[in-house]
Every structure is written in structure tokens, then in C-alpha cells.
Image (cartoon, helix red, strand yellow):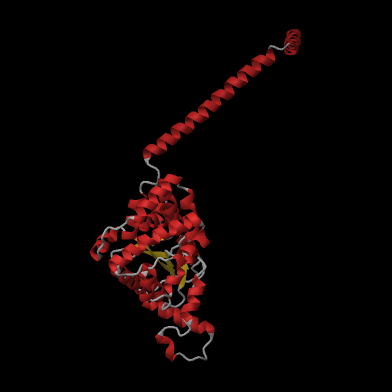
């Protein structure tokens, strides 16, 4: 099936999903005898007509301009939110992007092809088989930590009756409907994240963190999720739990933010179509990072003020003045040293005698 081929293509962080073979419904009447170039042109024109010049975007979307002129639409999502799914669908339909980037890695790509019921069941079940698989994949300590973090996700899933990653599945479905739209996995591989996180903790920090994860039981409602729309619920809970461990926060949050931002920039560079557009579906906590790194105004250098110009002139004048004075003093002492030498004295004496004879 086309969906499975797209999933396979998406397994590489910088790979892309092909356009569905059946294409948009509007092309059903197009003759099959047309050339590939004509078909490409027709599909591209249809896509550009659908793309809104001034799209009506949800409030969770941040619009950015890259240095090469591409448009980037960052959708800040909550991982357990129905409204986030709607935001993603509306954004992709409005902007008709050339690339869609999601906060997933190849190790979690399976959630894109699972239905909601299967995912809900999988998220709630944490069994010995999953534990063995996690340990085999990540090592003993990293595997145990992964299972504890899955317990946090399972706790939220059980409380809300909602499987995580719904916005990513919606992004994948909508991206497959857009002609020439690539689908990228932008997150750092999760085994790398867990191994670096474990390596950053001391033994007692690991025990303390595991204890906190094991006894997590606070009730959560859907209203709580929507209230946390400005800061994703799962990310907020994780931030509260790992706040006492700065090194853990660095590996799980900060490093992944930088990695995902880099992948988003790389994806934007690879767009070859005119008037390029890119949509990023990420946790709302990442939006400030993207705004800082990708925003064109943040890369431009403001003109120097009058005071800074005067300061630079004074510094340059001082440096050149000191250099000139230094050269003068060195030259003066060099001349004095040469004139004090016996050979120089003898030469000057002879020169004086010659002049007196004339």
C-alpha cells in the first residue's frame, strides 16, 4: 500500500514520502498520454492555486522566513490534544507545504501507521516483552529509564483515554494528500537520547528519578491538557520531574531542541520548488527555539549606533597613535645606539674633517 511505502521512506530522518500514486482528485480527468513534464506542471499549478497567499492560521502557528526566502510554519502542539490535531490539519491544508517535519525519530515511526485503538492499547500496556526489547535496544539502564518514561505516557493515556502522537498521524495523512510534499522525521534517535541521559546522572540521581517516575499518580483531565496548550502537558510534567537534574534536562530537552532545529533548517535548504513552504509539527515548547534560530530578523545585524562608531574611532586612533609613538621611540633609540658605536664615531669624525678641509 502507498501508506506503507511512505512510512518506509520516512524511516530515514532526512528521507521523504512520495506523492500518492492516485494523486489529487482534480487530476482524474487528465489524459494519461501527457508527458511527465506536463503532468508535473499541472500538479504544481494546482498546488499553488490551493496555497493561500494569506492563510488563516490557528493561534498556535508561528510564521517564519528563512534566509533563502522560504516560509516556515511552526505548529506548536500538545501531544494529547484534539485541538492540536485540528490545528495541524488546517495549517497543512491552508499552506500546501513542500515539506512537513515532525518531532519523531525512526524508532517511533510505527505510530504513524497504527490506528487510534491499537495505539491506545499499546500505550497502556507495559509488559515484560517491551522491557526486554527496550533493554536489548538501549542497554540495561537506558532500557529501564525508557520504560519508566513510557509509564508516564501510559499514565496520561489512561487518564485521558487518548493515544499520544495524534497530531503527527494527522500531519502524515495530510502531507500524503499534498503534491510533491516531503515528510521528514526531525527528532534525534531515542536510543541516543536515553544513553546520553543516563550517562549524565550519578547513581543516586538515577535512584531518585526512578522513584519519582514509579509513583506518579496525579489525576489529569482533558481540560488540563487544553489549559497547558501554551506549554505541552507531557513536556511540562517532564520538566517538573527533571528540573532537579540540570544535566538530564540538557540531554532530554535542550540537546533535542537544537537537533530538531538543525534538521528543520536542513529540510528547508533542500526544497527545490519555487515559493517554498515548510510546515513543522512540534511540541509547543520548541516554538521559541525555532523563532530564535530560524527567524530572519534574528540573523540580521543591526546598524551600529553613533556612540559605538565614536568608540570604535577612539579605539582605532589610540591603537594607531600608540603604534606610531612606539615606532618613533624605537627609531630614536636605534639611531642613538648606532651613533654611539666606535665605527660610527670614527666615520663621523672623518666626515667632519673632510667638510672642514673644503
Residue 337 visible, this orientation = yes
Question: What is the quadrant of residue 257 in the picture?
Answer: bottom left
**Rendered view: 279 above or below 244:** below
| Relative side of 234 to 112, left or right | left
Q: Is residue 323 above or below residue 257?
A: above
Residue 248 image point, x, y percent:
42, 50
The residue under the point 39% across, 70% down is 122
The image shows a total of numbered marks equal to 0
- From this viewpoint, which residue is outermost toward the front? 128
**Quadrant of the rendering where the C terminus is positioned:** top right
Quadrant in which residue 23 is drawn: bottom left
Residue 58 image-quadrant placement: bottom left
As rendered, which of 79 and 319 lies closer to the eye?
A: 79
Instruction: Measuring from the top left, give residue 255's x and y in whole percent.
Output: 45, 53
Q: Please tell me which residue is depicted at 50% across the width and 84% down the height of the picture.
A: 38
Nearest the eye: 26 or 336: 26
Q: Where 328 falls versus 355 (above or below)? A: below
Relative image position of residue 62 (x, y in whole percent): 34, 62
Answer whether residue 98 is visible to the viewer in this image. Answer: no
Q: Is residue 14 left or right of residue 230?
A: right
Residue at the spot x=27%, y=63% of the render?
Answer: 225
Q: What residue do we see at 38% from left, 78% from top?
A: 49
Q: Return the residue nearer the eye: 235 or 139.
A: 139
**Could you tell whether 85 is left or right of 106 in the image?**
left
Amino acid at each position: 500500500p502507498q501508506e506503507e511505502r511512505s512510512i518506509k521512506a520516512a524511516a530515514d530522518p532526512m528521507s521523504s514520502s512520495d506523492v500518492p500514486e492516485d494523486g489529487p482528485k482534480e487530476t482524474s480527468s487528465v489524459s494519461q498520454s501527457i508527458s511527465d513534464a506536463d503532468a508535473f506542471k499541472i500538479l504544481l499549478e494546482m498546488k499553488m492555486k490551493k496555497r493561500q497567499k494569506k492563510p488563516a492560521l490557528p493561534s498556535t502557528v508561528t510564521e517564519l522566513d528563512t534566509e533563502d526566502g522560504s516560509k516556515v510554519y511552526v505548529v506548536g502542539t500538545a501531544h494529547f490534544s484534539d485541538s492540536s490535531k485540528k490545528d495541524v490539519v488546517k495549517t497543512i491544508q491552508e499552506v500546501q507545504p513542500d515539506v512537513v517535519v515532525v518531532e519523531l525519530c525512526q524508532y517511533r515511526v510505527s505510530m504513524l501507521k497504527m490506528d487510534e485503538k491499537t495505539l491506545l492499547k499499546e500505550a497502556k500496556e507495559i509488559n515484560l516483552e517491551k522491557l526486554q526489547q527496550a533493554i536489548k535496544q538501549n542497554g540495561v539502564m537506558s532500557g529501564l529509564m525508557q520504560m519508566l518514561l513510557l509509564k508516564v505516557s501510559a499514565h496520561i493515556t489512561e487518564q485521558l483515554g487518548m493515544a499520544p502522537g495524534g497530531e503527527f498521524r494527522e500531519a502524515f495523512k495530510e502531507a500524503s494528500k499534498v503534491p510533491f510534499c516531503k515528510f521528514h522525521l526531525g527528532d534525534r534517535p531515542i536510543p541516543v537520547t536515553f544513553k546520553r541521559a543516563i550517562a549524565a546522572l550519578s547513581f543516586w540521581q538515577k535512584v531518585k528519578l526512578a522513584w519519582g517516575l514509579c509513583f506518579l499518580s496525579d489525576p489529569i483531565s482533558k481540560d488540563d491538557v487544553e489549559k497547558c496548550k501554551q506549554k505541552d502537558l507531557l513536556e511540562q510534567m517532564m520538566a517538573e520531574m527533571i528540573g532537579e537534574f540540570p544535566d538530564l534536562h540538557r540531554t532530554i530537552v535542550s540537546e533535542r531542541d537544537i537537533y530538531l532545529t538543525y534538521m528543520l533548517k536542513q529540510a528547508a535548504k533542500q526544497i527545490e520548488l519555487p515559493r517554498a513552504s515548510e510546515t513543522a509539527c512540534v511540541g509547543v515548547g520548541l516554538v521559541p527555539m525555532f523563532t530564535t534560530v530560524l527567524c530572519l530578523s534574528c540573523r540580521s545585524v543591526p546598524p551600529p549606533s553613533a556612540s559605538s562608531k565614536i568608540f570604535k574611532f577612539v579605539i582605532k586612533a589610540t591603537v594607531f597613535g600608540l603604534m606610531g609613538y612606539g615606532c618613533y621611540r624605537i627609531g630614536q633609540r636605534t639611531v642613538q645606539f648606532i651613533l654611539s658605536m666606535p665605527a660610527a664615531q670614527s666615520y663621523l669624525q672623518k666626515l667632519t674633517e673632510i667638510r672642514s678641509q673644503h
